[in-house]
Amino acid sequence: MKRTSRTERTQRSRSQRARLAAIALAVVGVLGIAGTATALLLTQGDGQAEAPIAPLEQPAPTPPPVTTASAEATAPPETVEVPDVVGRSLAEAEVVLEAAGLVVKLTEDPSALADAVGDARGVLAQEPAAMQLVPAGTAIMLVVPAEAGAGGGPAAGALEGAVVCIDPGHQARGDSRQEPVGPGASETKPRVTGGTTGVTTRVPEYEVVLQISMNLKERLEAAGITVVMTRDTNDVSISNAERAQMANAAGADLFVRVHADGSTDANRAGISTLYPGANRWTGPIAPPSERAARLVQDALVASTGATDLGIKPRTDIAGFNWATVPSVLVECGFMTNPVEDRLLSSPHYQDKLAEGMAAGIIAYLGE
Ligand SMILES: [Zn+2]
């Protein structure tokens, strides 16, 4: 991936900073950063955050041993050093900021578009700036080029010719006829099921995942990616094996299956991304699928703030076993959870889901 030179980044960073001043002031004002920039230096996460710098005036008080999120309510707010993410891909920036205990906010800069075409499409500027001390949970505003708002990271040219096959899960009527769980398998599964239903909204899964999928399609196409849909209406009859074969026939760089989850536990909530575990069919696609799943999952959690249920290898899914292209299946949330059920039908939350998926997919395609 072509990278922006340090000088260019610095110049952009300066010009962006001026444009961001109003937003940054609002953020700083709300969070009272100036008043809380104590010398308490704590880092958290998995060590990806940069090392803390020395405190300005007073010596740092001995930090309390904070090992989990359940710190004493009376403890002062944790202070973290803002990592430098300018020049990184959006997906990388999200991972780094999240690991530091910070929240990512995005703003698109249309004026940066021409600048960014053919150039690195990563983070152009950030506010607050790197190395500032802020309370954990502070929103870090990232400026990304307008058309890279859904992703960032790869050069524009890297996406030309890329093909993504999107499979909105299920369909209006399930088909309980059986099909082999993989090519040549004696074990069979129903061709396709009807999916779950919103416990509060009563909206069926096949409907909500089609809405999210069409939103995702628009974002990927805006980034120059060719999108092939397995379906764009609910009234179809396409088995899971046939969906995978559609992705194969399209020569998809990634097969993205969009589903929503269900559970007997109404409290269960969050997002997970499934990928093919290695078996006699999926050996070649398992490693790239896992990489894609990681990028998509991380970007989704960052964009939605949903509970991170992680990525999970699966060897029992026909729609994976029939695939010869890298594949992931996103479980966007639990329709059996009243809160997530409502969110899944909300256009705003669907935007967040599609934005996160697009970011992860674009990061994968740019690898
Ligand atoms: Zn499903």
Image: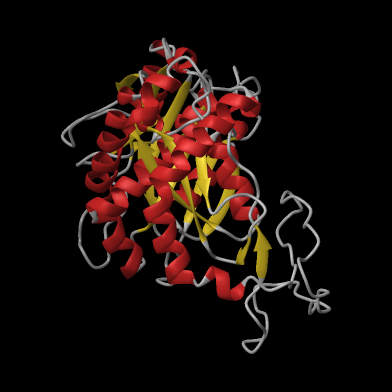
Position of 256 compared to 286: left or right? left
Residue at the (76%, 53%) spot, across then down: 47
Please determine whether, in this image, residue 336 is positioned above or below residue 108.
Answer: below
Q: Is residue 317 visible to us here?
A: no
Which residue is located at x 74 percent, y 50 percent?
Answer: 50
**Residue shown at 17% from the left, 33% from the top:** 233
Work out which quarter of the rendered image holds the N terminus and state it: top right
Across and down, in percent, residue 206 comes to: 26, 44
Q: Is there any visible trace of residue 196 in the rendered image?
A: yes
The outermost residue toward the bottom is 74
Q: Quadrant of residue 194?
A: top left
Nearer to us in this view, 241 or 72: 72
Left or right relative to 44: residue 129: left
Asked whether 292 or 75 is in front, the reply is 75
How far across and how far down the image is residue 343, in percent?
30, 60
Residue 334 x %, y %: 39, 59
Whether 249 is drawn above or below 274: the answer is: above
Residue drawn at the location 20% of the way across and 63% of the way down: 201
Q: Quadrant of residue 354?
A: top left
Residue 115 point in image, percent of width and height: 43, 21
